[in-house]
Amino acid sequence: MRRIASLMLALAAILPLKAATDYIQNVYGRQIQMLNGKWGAIVDQYDRGLKKKIYANPHPKGKTDFYEYDLDGSSRLNVPGDWNSQRQELRYYEGTVWYGRHFTARREAGKRQFLYFAGVSQRCNVYLNGQKLASHEGAFTPFQVEVTEALKDGDNILVVEVSNQRLKDAIPALQFDWWNYGSITRDVMLVTLPNRYISYYQVQLDKHQPDLIHAKVCLSEAVAGETICIEIPEVKQSIKLRTNTDGIAESSFRVKRLERWSPEHPKRYEVRLSSSEDAVSEQIGFRNIEVRGTKVLLNGRETFLRSVSFHEEIPQRMGRAYSEGDAAYLLSEAKALGVNTIRLAHYQQNEYIVREAEKMGIMVWQEIPVWQDIDFGNTTTCSLAKQMLRETIMRDVNRCADCFWGIANETKDGEARNAFLRELLQTGKDLDSTRLYTAAFNTAVWDKQRKCFHLDDGMIPYLDIISINRYMGWYSAWPLPPAECRWEVASEKPLFISEFGGEALYGQTGDATVVSSWSEDHQEKLYRDNIEMFEQIPNLCGISPWVLFDFRSPYRMHPDHQDGWNRKGLVSDQGLRKRAWHVVHDYYLRK
């Protein structure tokens, strides 16, 4: 498939949100027609589909006409879903698949209509009734395209060319330690909106003050003097704003007796926004999240981050998680562990997961897939990363559970990398300065002379929280007994252990001191040793075991113990808790 990151897309990624936009926020609160279901699918291994005009879905009209494909008569795949788990021959497939389906629609006078894709992995071209309308790169963020003129009354044919091919200058790049699921992996819908609608809004509590709300509302057109009303009925709050020449209205206001959201009390309020043509409402929570010295403060109180990571995957079916039910399953198992935080590794997970976490009272760390060997010297790659961060923030800026934006995982200090991450960080802060920004580093090393761990990294001054991935007892041998392992890392800032752990095959017993036993005995001891070491870290603000569930990864090739699975999970691929799960659970009860 052709590389579709265009110059226009790159420019859009660079600019902060400062003018009217066609972005659709809170899409599930809008007038929508779901287009999920069975779609026709044609595997295009040699990328011949464009030349053959599959996007037009033609049919023979005369006796001499014929085509070597037929979307209407092809085998079908579920949307949302991944092709890898639906057909055995596509389990490892990396390439292009053409998806197509018919749907019936009605054009509405005085309305605008959009196709909205919650996620397509990794890049795609979108065609409606034979006309190319959009391209998008980035598997884990939504995009939309206006179809007001292209839509027909009655039958329409929607065709999407999808590729999950790995590329050196992509994000993630050629190598990553999770399954390369391809397909239309999240919801697809037709959205109908007023001619001039509320496209984007931020209604957030100030980072520090407990009663000050900042509001920003953007119309889809740059119209000055439009009245915008914001209401929070439960606290009897109603304010009116006027848009400027860019179609943006901004204000700050104080609210008395505001109950703040927390893991113990995940309070949310109905917030209503309206203009002369449009109205939208949703449940929004309010909280303060900040750093003071080496502490993370939630609503002014020191909070230890009891976290865990998981992939957007249901291990029992070996496929992408995509539904509300999937979100509830993953988060319920995390909640049972005793967490107040989840790190959604290593990419932006679907909106159901983020919204359900907020309902359940779980803080969220979301990160974009800037994972290890990114092409940091490539300006197009940098623009793509900024686009991904912008799309993440724009989708979830009103989710108070989102407390941390992660900008990278396991990257190496260097001039090109640091310049890349500083640009990325500035892009995020231009949109949202109320969250804490972090990145996970795996370059903390043991200093034999000083007998401590330390980290030298040029990004330390720029981040709110310093996060460390360190697999003591698995990839690294203990230099001293765990209780004697000191840490001197970013001593003036909060330090978060963002990954640690080791692999074990569920039910396997063996010598707890032998790494190659792949046993629950060794994994359990490894966790006890790491927790003993954590007690020696003076600026520790939280930990996040890697990982909640065993997950699929072609990286993992041991025929007996892995067989294509990363076995670091506290829970097995069959949903069974390993002994190390109980070690973490008991530790979290004490914290």
Image: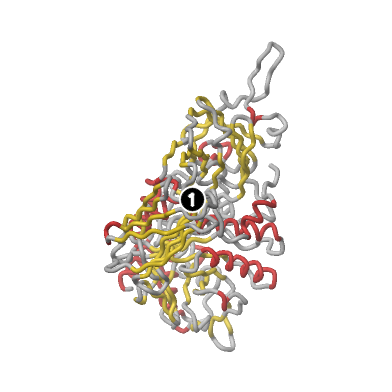
Q: Quadrant of the C terminus?
A: bottom left
Comparing 108 with 291, the one in front is 108
Comparing 392 with 531, the one in front is 392
Q: Position of residue 303 (x, y in %)?
A: 37, 74
Comparing 5 with 550, the one in front is 5
What residue type is disc 1 on? Ser
Residue drawn at (63%, 30%), measured in percent from left and top? 130
Which residue is denoted by mark 1 in the rendering? 199
Q: Position of residue 217 (x, y in %)?
A: 46, 57
Work out which residue is located at the far bottom of the displayed protein and give it. Answer: 449
Crowd class of label 1 (few under 14; some 14 to 19; many from 20; radius 10 Å): many
- Residue 560 seen in the figure: no
**Vertical side of 562 occupied by 493: above or below:** below
Residue drawn at (56%, 24%), measured in percent from left and top? 72
**Vertical side of 154 occupied by 199: above or below:** below
Q: Position of residue 82 (x, y in %)?
A: 52, 42
**Vertical side of 226 occupied by 540: above or below:** below
Q: Quadrant of the N terminus?
A: top right
Q: Quadrant of residue 555?
A: bottom right
